[in-house]
Amino acid sequence: MRAHGMVAPGDLVLVSVSGGPDSVCLLYALHQLRRLFRMRLAVFHFDHRLREDSASDASYVRRLGERLGVPVHVRTADGSPAKGESVEAWATFRRTNAANDVRREIGAAQTAEGHTLDDQAETVLLNLVRGTGIEGLAGIDPGGRSDRSVQPLLEVTRAETEAFCRALHLRPRRDPMNEDRRYLRAAVRHDVLPMLERATGRGVIAPIARTADTIRRDRDELWERTVLLAQEIVEERDDDVRFEAAALAALPDAVAARLIRFSAYQVLSVDAPAPWTKTGIEAVLDLAHGRPGRRRDLPDGRVARRDRTHVIVTRAERQRRGDNKDDH
């Protein structure tokens, strides 16, 4: 925690507790360290209502809070995943939003989560399968004082959190969904990682996590350079993005692609697939290298067009209004 500057004296830390071994270990460890770090604690639990007995997890977490004298805030999902929607992605999104709401309500500095070294290795492999690029291969960020969430157990193995709970005679809850191979993370945890260790004759969790650390440092350096470039050659107007065409075309493709993706995230909805998909990025680069007057449709209904000096990414309806205005 000190290495990453996760907390400061006087901070109120919201501890996310599912009731499983990792989060129970986190809660008890932070409770034992609270005087050393001069921090105050509150507990957050989210009932996803994905199991009939999920309310019993909330009751268990409430009892832990009462035992430690820590206030507990429970929130419950008000819906369920849509047909075909990833249950894991839905659960993470709902839980994170609820935790952020509670964090703001109580004035907590950050939310502490119980991700472990094993979770880091699983996340890297999951993102490799999903093709997320350098951002995904950087894995879970440990977080710091300025971040909304921190990961105090990210260098601790799952075996160590379970041993910690046994040593304190704690009886964490067990979520059967963590054993269900229909969920990708469970398949990676119970099948892929053990297979890799059998095939290589060595532990792979720590090396994968070290690789994520290395990639994260590279990603952060690239991020800083991208921010500087964006200040020089990107202009943002409402939800439009304007790139200086000649400057964008002069960049190496890898740097230009990162700049386009960064600029899109700054302005456009994160739910939209373009222009940070491969297809969208290639369309914007094609316009930067080409002649003025061309346009390309992007996957989410936006349009990229090239004028004399810039590539402009805008909403399709706004582009149509502009075209109609030019006709009069």
Image (cartoon, grey):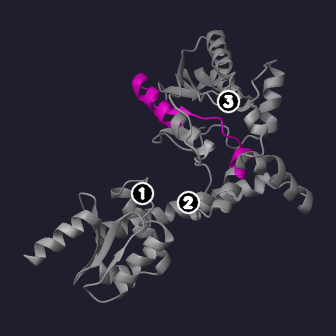
Q: Which of 243 and 304 is in front in this view?
A: 304
In the rendered image, the vertical position of residue 169 relative to residue 212, given as above or below: above
In-image side of 58 versus 270 (left or right):
right
Magenta residue span: 96-122
Report helix, strand or loop for mark 2. helix
User: Residue 145 at x, y = what percent?
Assistant: 48, 39
Mark 2 to mark 1 CA distance (whole Å):
18 Å
Looking at the rendered structure, the kind of residue marked 1 is Ala
> Is residue 63 depicted above or below 275 in this figure?
above
> Are circles 2 and 1 on residues that touch, CB within 8 Å?
no
Q: Label 1: how many residues lie within 10 Å, few (<14), some (14-19) or many (20+)?
A: some
Few, some or many C-alpha atoms within 10 Å of disc 2 (few <14, some 14-19, many ≥20)?
A: some
Q: Nearer the viewer, mark 1 or mark 3?
A: 1
Q: Residue 105 in magenta?
A: yes
| Sequence-first disc among 2 and 1 | 2
Q: Return the x and y of residue 203 as percentages of the image width and height.
A: 85, 54
Give the spatial CA distance, label 1 vs label 3.
Answer: 33 Å
Q: Is the magenta stretch mostly helix, strand or loop?
A: helix
Which quadrant of the rendered structure holds the N terminus? top right
Q: Is residue 5 above or below residue 65?
A: below
Q: Residues within 10 Å of mark 3 (few under 14, many from 20)?
A: many
Q: In this view, does 37 lie to the left or right of 121?
A: left
Amino acid residing under circle 3: Ser
- Report which residue position mark 2 lands on: 135
Q: Do the residues labelled 3 and 2 touch (CB within 8 Å)?
A: no
Image coords of residue 40 (percent x, y): 52, 21
Residue 23's label in the rendered image is 3
Q: Distance between the residues labelled 3 and 2?
A: 25 Å
The amino acid on which the numbered mark 2 sits, given as a three-letter code, is Glu
Dot label at residue 272: 1
